[in-house]
Image (spheres, grey):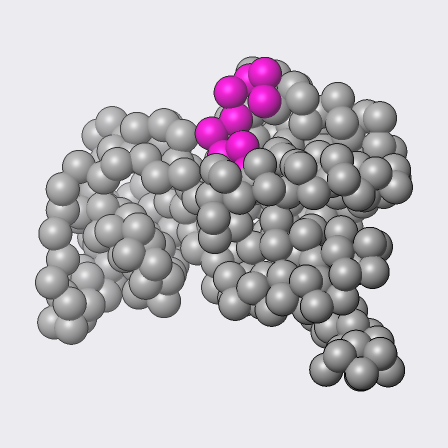
Amino acid sequence: MFNKRKRSTRRWSVRAIELMIVLVAMMATASILFPEPQVKEIRVIEVVDAPVRPANADELIVASYDAALNYMYDEDYANSATLLAAITNAAQDHYWSHVTYSFVLYEQGHYDAAIQVASEGISIDPNDPVAWNNRCLLRALTGDLTGGLSDCNHSIQVDPTYDYNFNNRCYILTQLGQLNEAERDCLQALKNGHRMPEWVYTNLGQIALMRSLPMLAEDHFRTALDYNPMHADAYAGLGDTMLVEAQYNKALNYYNIYRNYAGVHYNISFDVKVEYVAQTLANLGQN
């Protein structure tokens, strides 16, 4: 939401003109509709969790933000990012534009830029959990597990009923090897009514694998796929499970499915696993 800071009329008019130029240029290449956008559940990072039309927002900002959301829902992240960059520049205190922009940058694989935008969102409204939650996962994905854990703790402190932050902290604690604490957070996320349970069950599957319980891990990964048959990380987990059980053909198949669904989020460390499985099959004369 917009904060109470005053802006000069002259500066605002220049920003509005700049934004109008961007909007008109995009309307020349695509048909833009402005229906009331529906909240969409998207992966672990969340886009919006509050009304997308802030009170007293400039009409141009509202129309442009709606257009950016429509592009995002159509998975046209390039056009969505172009609009959101203009909006966050013109309306630097528009919290939800920053939250949404951080997600779009995440979907484009621009994690460092997404962290910066999420940080700007936190500076606008540090009392909302979503920007903290977004930056939590983004920092973890770039290898900053300590920073990610700190952000998750802040998000939970701000709103302990918010479901996404517990699952993200579960993911980070799993990476840190704190399995009991991770499992407790996953179960709390389910108790809070996590809206994308496939992520929770995938994390539970990883915990089971790290505890050398491949059968339980497989059950969790398949439960995740029951919720979302295109959930990439569940296929990666099944590949790891089959590798542990020396079912190499199945492992290779699941790794390939993971690659197809992961897109820009593909973890290149799986190249080593795929090469190992392929070489093992060749040695066994099964390739």
Q: Which residues are magenta?
A: 190-198
Q: Is residue 102 above or below residue 277?
A: above
Residue occupying the far front of the picture: 285
Q: Is residue 15 above or below residue 52?
A: below
Q: Is residue 286 above or below residue 125?
A: below
Q: Is residue 62 left or right of residue 184?
A: left
Q: Nearer the viewer, residue 91 or 70?
A: 70
Q: Which of the 4 image quarters holds residue 31?
A: bottom left
Q: Nearer the viewer, residue 78 or 115?
A: 78
Q: Residue 143 in the image: x percent, y percent?
A: 76, 55
Residue at 87% x, 37% y: name it: 211
Q: Residue 68 in the image: x percent, y percent?
A: 28, 53
149 drawn magenta: no
Q: Which of the 4 image quarters holds residue 8?
A: top left
Q: Residue 189 in the image: x percent, y percent?
A: 61, 24
Quadrant of the frame with the C terminus: bottom right
Q: Nearer the viewer, residue 37 or 58?
A: 37
Residue at 32% x, 35% y: name it: 39
Residue 154 visible within the image: no
Residue at 17% x, 47% y: name it: 63
- Total of numbered circles in the picture? 0
Quadrant of the frame with the N terminus: top left
Q: Nearer the viewer, residue 78 or 216?
A: 216
Residue at 52% x, 56% y: name it: 106
Q: Residue 261 in the image: x percent, y percent?
A: 51, 62
